[in-house]
Image (cartoon, rainbow, N blue to C red):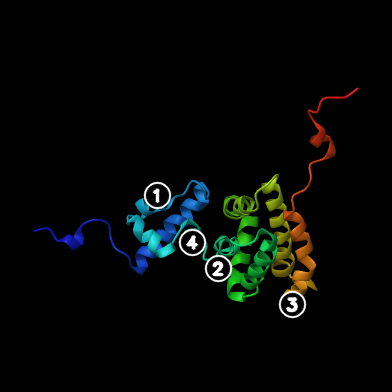
C-alpha cells in the first residue's frame, strides 16, 4: 500500500522555511517585486502554497523575511491606513518612529537601504516595493485629484526624515524626542496630503469666451 504521508509536497520544517526564503530572495532580486508571486515561489521551492502563506502571510511578509527585516515597513503602514484621512500623517509618523527607534528594527532597515544604494537590482526592488506597497496604498486611501503625486510627496518627507535621523544621524534631528519630531515634520506631512486647487488657467480651460 502507498504511504499517505509520502504523497504531495513536503511539509514544513526549518530547512523548508530557509529554502523558501532562498528562492524568494533570488527571485525578488532577479525579477522585481511585482513579477514574483507566492505561488511561483512555492512551486520552485517544492512546497504547498498554503505553507508559504502559513510562514509569511502575504507577499509583503515574504519580502520582509527574505530581506531579513525585523519589521516590514509596508506591513507597518498597513496597520495605520484605516481611520480618518485627516489624522493619517500623525498615525504614519508615530508608527515610523516606533519602528525605527528600536535598534533591532533599524539595523536591518539601514542595511536594506545601503544595499539598495550599492546594488542596482536591490535598488530597483526596494523602489518597486515602496511605490506599490506604500505610495500606491496611501494614494488609494487619500483619493482625490493628484492622489499619487501627493502620496509621493508625503513619502519623500518621510524618507528625508529616515535619512537624517537614522542613516546619516544628523544632529539635532537624530537626538530629538518623538514629540519634537512630530512638531517639526507634521505640518509638511499634512500639507503634502492636502488637495491643491487646480491652477486658474486649468479651471477656466474650455469655457467659451464672452464678448
Residue 40, numbered circle: 1
Q: Which sits earlier in the primary sequence, circle 3 or circle 1? A: 1
Q: Residues within 10 Å of mark 2 (few under 14, many from 20)?
A: some
Q: Is residue 11 placed above or below 41 in the rendered structure?
A: below
Q: Is residue 70 placed above or below 195 in the rendered structure?
A: below
Q: Circle 3 is placed at which residue position? A: 177
SS at mark 4 in the image: helix
* Marks 2 and 3 in Cβ contact (< 8 Å): no
Which residue, as the protein is rendered here, is positioned at the far left? 1
Q: How far across and how far down the image is residue 93, in percent?
A: 68, 66
Q: Which sits earlier in the primary sequence, circle 4 or circle 3? A: 4
Q: Residues within 10 Å of mark 4 (few under 14, many from 20)?
A: some
Q: Which sits earlier in the primary sequence, circle 2 or circle 4? A: 4
Q: For the point 91% across and 22% down, which residue is it?
A: 211
Residue 106 appears in which quarter of the rendering?
bottom right
Q: Which sits earlier in the primary sequence, circle 1 or circle 4? A: 1
* Marks 2 and 1 in Cβ contact (< 8 Å): no
SS at mark 2 in the image: loop
Q: How many angstroms separate mark 1 from mark 4 (CA)?
A: 15 Å
Q: Circle 4 is placed at which residue position? A: 61
Amino acid at each position: 500500500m502507498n504511504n499517505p504521508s509520502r504523497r504531495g509536497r513536503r511539509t514544513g520544517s526549518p530547512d523548508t522555511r530557509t529554502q523558501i526564503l532562498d528562492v524568494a530572495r533570488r527571485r525578488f532580486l532577479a525579477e522585481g517585486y511585482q513579477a514574483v508571486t507566492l505561488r511561483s515561489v512555492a512551486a520552485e521551492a517544492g512546497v504547498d502554497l498554503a505553507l508559504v502563506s502559513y510562514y509569511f502571510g502575504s507577499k509583503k511578509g515574504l519580502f520582509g523575511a527574505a530581506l531579513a527585516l525585523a519589521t516590514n515597513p509596508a506591513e507597518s503602514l498597513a496597520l495605520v491606513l484605516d481611520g480618518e484621512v485627516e489624522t493619517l500623517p500623525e498615525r504614519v509618523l508615530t508608527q515610523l518612529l516606533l519602528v525605527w527607534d528600536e535598534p533591532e528594527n533599524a539595523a536591518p532597515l539601514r542595511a536594506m537601504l545601503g544595499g539598495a544604494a550599492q546594488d542596482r537590482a536591490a535598488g530597483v526592488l526596494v523602489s518597486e516595493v515602496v511605490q506599490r506597497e506604500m505610495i500606491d496604498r496611501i494614494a488609494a486611501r487619500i483619493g482625490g485629484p493628484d492622489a499619487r503625486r501627493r502620496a509621493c510627496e508625503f513619502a519623500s518627507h518621510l524618507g528625508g526624515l529616515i535619512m537624517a535621523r537614522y542613516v546619516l544621524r544628523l544632529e539635532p534631528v537624530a537626538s530629538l524626542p518623538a514629540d519634537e519630531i512630530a512638531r517639526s515634520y507634521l505640518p509638511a506631512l499634512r500639507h503634502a496630503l492636502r488637495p491643491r486647487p487646480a491652477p486658474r488657467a486649468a479651471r477656466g480651460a474650455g469655457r467659451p469666451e464672452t464678448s
